[in-house]
């Protein structure tokens, strides 16, 4: 390797080390993934809510199975709590939940939006909040119950789209929370954009909220927002068992990818990246040093003999013995001209003697061969026996001349 090549490799290595040092020294980026998992301490996890709920409630049970399965295998009473970006139960599962609620239980569901069947059942409708004038993407939420300080609003500034109830059943529905774009500290919501409602269903009750972010670490740890979450929880009876869903969560309870531990540890992650970069450099340099394998190209096969044999068989099977004999004689005369160097323009006694001498045949055998040739030439049709005799005499004649081919 030349001196210049070594310098280039050293420079590349130094640049790679500098990149690794910069990446390891910079602070870890905040994970804004909307997990809603109870064990996640990231901003949109719900670790804080889960811990506080267990502190204030008498009994909290986490449910890691679909409600359809859990309700069939268990006969229980209390409050079933769901919160996530989206919760879609499906027809059968929703029906089993509604049947459970009608038996005197409570369903609390917080999601950005709800499935159509649930909204139709409760005679509700939702639509997104107008964000045309909300350039900072800031919102404020408020509880309307006077006992919960209805004049106080709570700021939230990390959402992209908010929904509100634009249609409710006024005879059955009770509004418990409002939402609007942010208008300043402790200013009440001016427009009645409904974000949270409760409605009786059979002997039970359903509480719906379009603000699931109220249960996240990011919202609750920004004082005094925890009061809003506590206000929502005040609508359920914490003395009865609470069943907290962990099945309908965007974040996973456990990590199934074998690469998680590798890429989640900084040192292992950069060791993995360096290995990939080294492999790439090796491929680039080794690819230039080694020649590609030359493919083996099979030569074209000489099919002249096969073609000739096919044509001959075609003539023979069709009974054209006369034509075959003429071709045989023609090729035999060409053999005499090219191999024995004699002219076949005139066939006489002198020619027979010279041909016998040059071909290592007797004069008598040579004369017999040419007598047969002359006889067959005068006939218009010949049979297979005569053709075979002609072929045998010619092959025997040529066999006496093999020594010339061996010595040549």
Image (cartoon, rainbow, N blue to C red):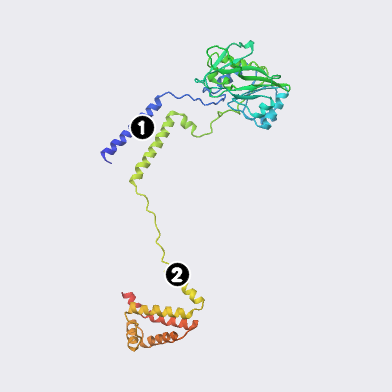
Q: Residue furthest left?
A: 3
The image quadrant that residue 209 belongs to is: top right
Callout 2 crowding tier (Cα within 10 Å): few <14, some 14–19, many ≥20: few
Q: Secondary structure at mark 1?
A: helix
**Residue labelled with disc 2:** 307
Nearest the viewer among 115 and 46 is 115
Q: Are marks 1 and 2 in contact (CB under 8 Å)?
A: no
Q: How far across and how far down the image is residue 297, in percent?
A: 39, 57
Could you tell whether 68 is left or right of 1 in the image?
right
The image quadrant that residue 234 belongs to is: top right
Q: How far across and how far down the image is residue 269, in percent?
A: 44, 31
Could you tell whether 153 is left or right of 239 in the image?
left
Q: Secondary structure at mark 2?
A: helix
Q: How far across and how far down the image is residue 38, in percent?
A: 57, 24
Q: Give me the residue at 57% from left, 19% from top.
A: 214
Nearest the viewer among 145 and 4 is 145
Q: On residue 46, which mark appears?
A: none
Q: How far across and how far down the image is residue 139, in percent?
A: 54, 18
Q: Nearer the viewer, mark 1 or mark 2?
A: 2
Whether residue 332 is situated above or below residue 109 in the rendered picture: below
Q: Is residue 141 visible?
A: yes
Callout 1 crowding tier (Cα within 10 Å): few <14, some 14–19, many ≥20: some
**Dividing the image into 4 quarters, which one contains the N terminus?**
top left
**Residue labelled with disc 1:** 16
């Amino acid at each position: 390797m030349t001196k210049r090549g070594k310098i280039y490799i050293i420079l590349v290595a130094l640049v790679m080390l500098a990149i690794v040092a910069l990446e390891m020294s910079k602070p870890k980026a905040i994970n804004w993934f909307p997990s809603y998992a109870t064990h996640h301490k990231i901003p949109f996890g719900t670790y804080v809510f889960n811990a506080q709920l267990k502190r204030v409630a008498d009994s909290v049970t986490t449910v890691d199975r679909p409600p359809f399965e859990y309700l069939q295998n268990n006969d229980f009473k209390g409050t079933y709590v769901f919160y996530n970006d989206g919760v879609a139960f499906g027809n059968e599962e929703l029906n089993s939940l509604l049947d459970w609620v009608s038996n005197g239980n409570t369903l609390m569901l917080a999601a950005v939006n709800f499935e159509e069947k649930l909204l139709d059942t409760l005679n509700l409708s939702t639509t997104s909040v107008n964000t045309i004038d909300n350039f900072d993407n800031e919102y404020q939420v408020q509880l309307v119950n006077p006992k919960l300080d209805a004049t106080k609003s709570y700021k939230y500034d990390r959402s992209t789209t908010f929904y509100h109830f634009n249609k409710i059943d006024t005879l059955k529905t009770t509004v418990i929370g409002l939402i609007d774009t942010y208008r300043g500290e402790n200013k009440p919501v001016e427009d009645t954009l409904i974000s949270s409602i409760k409605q009786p269903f059979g002997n039970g009750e359903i509480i719906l909220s379009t603000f699931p972010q109220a249960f996240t670490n990011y919202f609750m740890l920004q004082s005094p927002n925890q009061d809003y979450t506590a206000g929502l929880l005040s609508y359920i009876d914490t003395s009865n068992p609470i069943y907290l869903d962990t099945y309908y969560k965007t974040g996973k309870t456990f990590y199934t990818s074998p690469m998680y531990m590798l890429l989640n540890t900084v040192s292992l992650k950069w060791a993995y990246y360096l290995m990939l970069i080294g492999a790439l450099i090796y491929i680039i340099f080794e690819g230039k040093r080694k020649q590609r394998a030359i493919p083996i190209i099979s030569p074209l096969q000489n099919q002249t003999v096969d073609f000739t044999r096919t044509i001959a068989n075609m003539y023979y099977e069709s009974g054209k013995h006369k034509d075959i004999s003429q071709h045989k004689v023609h090729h035999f005369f060409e053999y005499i001209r090219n191999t024995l160097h004699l002219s076949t323009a005139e066939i006489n006694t002198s020619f027979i003697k010279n041909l016998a001498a040059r071909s290592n045949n007797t004069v008598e055998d040579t004369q017999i061969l040419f007598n047969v040739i002359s006889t067959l030439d005068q006939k218009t049709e010949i049979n297979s026996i005569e053709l075979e005799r002609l072929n045998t005499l010619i092959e025997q004649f040529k066999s006496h001349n093999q020594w010339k081919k061996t010595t040549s």
